[in-house]
Amino acid sequence: MTFIFANWKMYLNNEESLALAKDLSAQDLGSNALTCAVFPTMLSVAGAVSILKNSPIAIGAQNVAWAPKGAYTGAVSAQLCKDVGCTYVLIGHSERRHIFGEKTEDVRKRIAACIQADITPVLCIGETREDKERGTQKDMLKTQILGALEGLDLGNSGLIVAYEPVWAISGSGNGDHCNPAYAQDIHTWIRSEISTLTSKFVPLLYGGSVNQENVVSYTSQKDIDGVLVGSASIKSNSFLTMRDAVASSL
């Protein structure tokens, strides 16, 4: 199974999000070899679920609170996302860590909340440019992996891990190209680390300036099970081009 996940971030307003969902719903996306999901803003999740309910495209949330309910003004729980029709949740995206100051303990509590709510967490990890230049990227990644997952019951969590080097994310202001061979090496190492925490197969995705031109160079790597795409996924033609390119390469 190969995954194509589209993180719409905060690029689209509600009208644009629902128009994109409607456009995608009209496309023939059927393929037993592909799993597609889109991650709208929280305000557009319910509308996207309604539009895509008869489509093979799943819906994910971009973040959740760790508490199931209560006096948490502005928060949305994993259970609420599950109730409205979400299948996945992004947890620990680098923009949440580096812009909003989320700590590893916050990530861990959100993963635990997803497991409790029976919604699939997509754990995002990635090193900064400084980590890479110092050669400490694997130390940073290991800290993120263990801090988020060690001690949790991952048996039926459906966990997915997305490796997104911060220096390769276009929205970071850098957007440097990540060599697919480098990404493959890191994914092989991540798979080995994850295997010490669970015997279940955990899909590994790559994200970081993925687009129509380079998507297959990543998905064709042995240990890369799919992609998490940002800005290149917010127009139906680019999303469909990526989807078709990956499907044709399988």
Image (tube, rainbow, N blue to C red):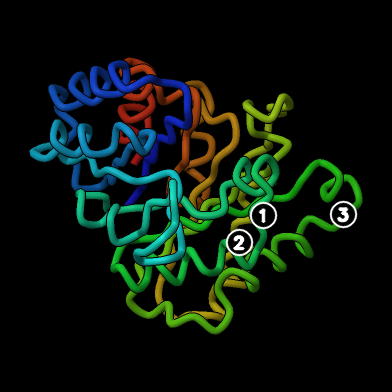
Q: What residue type is labelled 1?
A: Asp
Badge 3 marks a residue whose secondary structure is loop
Q: Do tag 1 and tag 2 residues touch (Cβ < 8 Å)? A: yes
Badge 1 marks a residue whose secondary structure is helix
Residue 219 is situated, as x and y percent measured from the top left of the image, at: 46, 42
Q: Against 195, is 103 above or below?
A: above
Task: Using the image, tell me which numbered label, if any, was put on residue 139.
Answer: none
- Residue at label 2? 188
Q: Spot the residue most to the front.
A: 71
Residue 172 is situated, as x and y percent measured from the top left of the image, at: 68, 30
Badge 3 crowding class, 10 Å Cα cut-off, few under 14, some 14 to 19, many 20 or more, is few
Q: Closer to the N terminus: mark 1 or mark 3?
A: 3
Q: Against 235, is 151 above or below?
A: below
Q: Do tag 2 and tag 3 residues touch (Cβ < 8 Å)? A: no
Q: Closer to the N terminus: mark 2 or mark 3?
A: 3
Asked which quadrant contains residue 77, the reply is bottom left
Q: What residue type is labelled 3?
A: Gly
Residue 96 is situated, as x and y percent measured from the top left of the image, at: 60, 45
Q: Could one spot residue 241 in this view of the protein?
A: yes
Task: Using the image, tell me which numbered label, if any, was put on residue 135.
Answer: 3
Asked which quadrant contains residue 48, the reply is top left
Q: Could one spot residue 222 in this view of the protein?
A: no
Q: Against 106, is 192 above or below?
A: below
- Residue at label 1? 185
Query: Which residue does the image show at 40% across and 22% down from the upper left?
Result: 234
CA separation, marks 1 and 2?
A: 5 Å
Q: Which amino acid does label 2 sit on?
A: Thr
